[in-house]
Amino acid sequence: MSIPTRATGAFPAFRIFHRGAAILGVAALALLGVQPLAHAAPPTIAQATTSTAQDASDAESDLAPVCGTPAKGHAACYAMRTTDQSARMRLSSSEVPAGLGPQDIQSAYSLPAGGGAGQTIAIVDAYDDPNAEADLAVYRSQYGLPPCTSANGCFKKVDQRGGTDYPPSNDAWVGEIALDLDMVSAAAPGADILLVETDNDGLENLAAGVDEAVALGAKYVSNSYGRSGDFPTDLATYGSSYDHPGVAVVAASGDNKYGVSFPATLPSVTAVGGTTLTADPTSARGWSETVWTRGSYGPGSGCASNQTKPDFQQDTGCTGRSVADVSAVADNVAVYLTYGSQGIGWQRYGGTSVATPVIASLYALAGPPRPGTSPNSYPYAADGVGLNDITTGSNGTCSVAYLCNAGTGYDGPTGLGTPAGLAAFRSGPHGTLSGTVKDSVTGKPVAHATVGSGLDIATTDTQGAYTLDLPAGTVKDLTVKAFGYTTATPVTLDISDGQTLTRDFGLSAIPRERVHGTVKDGSGHGWPLYARLAVSGSPEAPVWTDPVTGAYEMNLPKGGDYTLNVTAALPGYEPVARKVTVGDKSITAHVALTADPDAATAVGYRLELADRGETFDSTATAPQGWSVVNAAGTNNGWEFDDPTQRGNATGGNGSFAVVESDNGSIGPHQDSQLVSPEYDLSAAQSAELTFKTAYLYNPNQQHMTVDASTDDGATWGNVWTGPKVSDSAQRLTAHVPLRQFAGHKAVRLRFHFVADWGYFWSLDDVNVQTRVLVPAPGGLTVGTVRDATSGAGVVGATVSDTASPDETALTTATPEDPAVGDGFYTLFSANPGPHTLRVTASGYVGLTRATTVHRDRVSRKNLALRPDA
């Protein structure tokens, strides 16, 4: 075997021996044009070095695929991860994860709050997620969902043969696993979950995982992965594994816009497209949806000409199998993940991998499919009942318009539509109940009320009207609920197959009490913040604070516990969930929002960075404060003198740390730790570890982790496991968030290598950077810029401070806030005292006006521009 020289720094081109198998709720409104203080932008937390192609993709979208392009005969997971986010581990009781949660999904699709009891939903994914159960527990606890553990029988993890010989972990697929588990929990909190982990992402192994899920009794199987294209051999080779009559086998349509992917192309599966789901209190439904697209990403769709068209598909532009069948949300959902290099805690995910487990859960909520039937035919038989028809959006260009453009009725990107209750996902006799819900005193319609019995729920529109599909027979405990009203007395009724019944309801309003307070900056300035407050579970429009005082006021029904979701209009602040209990007296609830040290975009703050690095300059021994800890029997642990003359392939210069498994005799076991000195993070608001690394990886015989400890090594927690590509060279600069350790005085890191005759792992330029946001002297000016003639707000005007031209803001529209008109701006000015504002806008005469800036306060300055004659 050739040995690379230090001069070349190359990796071995081949091996003589081959060992092992290859393998907030609603986001904050960012006011455009608000400029932070100038400073060098640090790397984003959790940003990893990527290829040029990936950089180009990220430039056009803040979503990035979790899995890369699969090898021949393999599949990629379809999870997408949002890249513009901060590291968030466990949240305090006053915080809320960014992104859509279970209550949002249940509300949008008229799902029961605790549905799924007695049903088992299977998830088939490749590789192992060692933290799957622990992370699932955090997600469910955060949203008040019942525990789902192996101890209570709700959660079960097996390998592809049904045993516990789990495959090796994989940094890409752990994100997919976490997403799938969380989405099943969100849509069907009462269901049991079976996680089948296949040996790797080979198509034959994933197919075997589906067979095993069915063999273990699952009637609903979610598959959030695929391989691009449609080949004549797909059905003969793998088709039987995805064809189980009486079982709902569900597959993602893919994330690469127009074009089809296997196994969603198979005639026996339910192919799932994706939408963007947005809260819309003004609509009858309370939500709006369009085709999901982000840059070059969007749901797959098209014509699988090599697959036979199912009898239930009636579209005429494709002689083969058309994709997709139905769709669901595919963007901006909250997920909790702690394992691997992307395991930073709370983050936001997207892709058709979101929609697929949601649709699998819909089948479970609707009840077991009839034996011998094809569940993917059920939505077609419903003839539009129980579906939201998505009519806007596109996922690309195509010769047959409906296959890539949303429209009335069936289309490729969204199929027949998204769930509106459970009716479209069950078979059997059913009838229809309809009517109106009104205020029993005023007679006014009650919008967004829910009418339901058990699992079946409908929501009233703006006129109070509802239509509810129900199984034929006796319907018990039919109830009507609405925010701010007492629940109607349950009723029982009988409905026969094909029958239409009418039933109106009147609800009594609950008296309300005043809730008021202020929202302010909580990171040093203390100034009032213009912010949005929405009440969890309320369909009513949010309230906004006064931009100058930060004061807000709302009236909430008495005798209830509520969560106020507070998001700043200014960028760079973290959202907060403030809990209040409303009784018979007025409630004062003040809120302080924290400037995010990882985003570092809050105006009026400068980011102070401090680095503590190690370059491993000595070739004789570990650097001062570092130590090498070798387990018994390990005689070739971490070294610093390049024992095999491999050369520094990490991208660093000079000497480096390396642990070699390649130069020993066949079979030696290694367990070696490179332990850092203590890092004092007590004054840090956040921190990040970076290091340069190079390695070859064998998934069966080599494991590399970075762990952290706050108790001098008594216990360790994993923070990085590295991208794992079998038997291939890897070189990268890793960025690992350490925010969860901010505030700790003594944090140690260890680089842990365990192998049975594996390859190698080398390190250089290890650095721990602390981050602190420091308030700069100054204050805020807010106001509106209007047309002096018409009084209309001027959107897109530039407001600047003549003393600091770099401090500018653009006026924006404020459509959600009725108290603040268009043309609104917020400007930070350094140094309190007299200042001069300059305002310019296309088509208007420029204007300058004097103002006074007060330290840590907000001043109002409204401005009027004369049209340019």
Image (tube, rainbow, N blue to C red):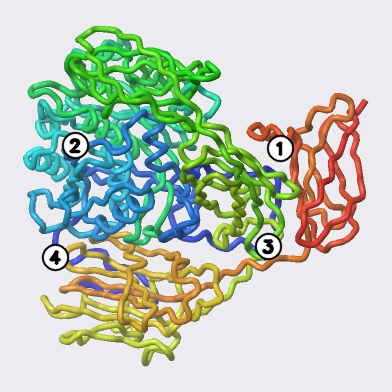
Which part of the image, by quadrant, shows the C terminus? top right
The local crowd at label 4, few if under 14, some if 14 to 19, many if 20 or more residues have their Cα within 10 Å, is some
* In-front residue for pair 367/733: 367
Could you tell which of marks 2 and 1 lies nearer the N-terminus?
2
Identify which amino acid the numbered label 4 is placed on: Arg
Could you tell which of marks 4 and 1 lies nearer the N-terminus?
4
Query: What is the x, y in percent for residue 542?
Result: 58, 37
Q: Please name the residue shown 30% across and 35% down the image.
A: 358
Q: Please name the residue shown 23% across and 38% down the image.
A: 223
Q: Please name the residue shown 35% across and 86% down the image.
A: 641
For label 3, the residue is: 605
Q: CA distance from mark 3 to mark 1?
A: 22 Å
Query: What is the x, y in percent for residue 415?
Result: 34, 21
Q: CA distance from mark 4 to mark 3?
A: 54 Å
For label 1, the residue is: 812
For label 4, the residue is: 19
Q: Determine whether the residue tagged by mark 3 lies in a helix, strand or loop.
A: strand
Could you tell which of marks 3 and 2 lies nearer the N-terminus?
2
Q: Determine whether the residue tagged by mark 2 lies in a helix, strand or loop.
A: strand
* In-front residue for pair 85/284: 284
Could you tell which of marks 3 and 1 lies nearer the N-terminus?
3
Residue 755 falls in image quadrant? bottom left
Q: CA distance from mark 4 to mark 1?
A: 61 Å
Q: Is residue 98 above or below residue 606?
A: above
Could you tell which of marks 4 and 3 lies nearer the N-terminus?
4
Does residue 414 appear in this view? no
Q: Please name the residue shown 90% across and 58% down the image.
A: 834
For label 2, the residue is: 221
Q: CA distance from mark 3 to mark 2?
A: 49 Å
The local crowd at label 2, few if under 14, some if 14 to 19, many if 20 or more residues have their Cα within 10 Å, is many
Which part of the image, by quadrant, shows the N terminus? bottom left
Q: In front: mark 4 or mark 2? A: 2
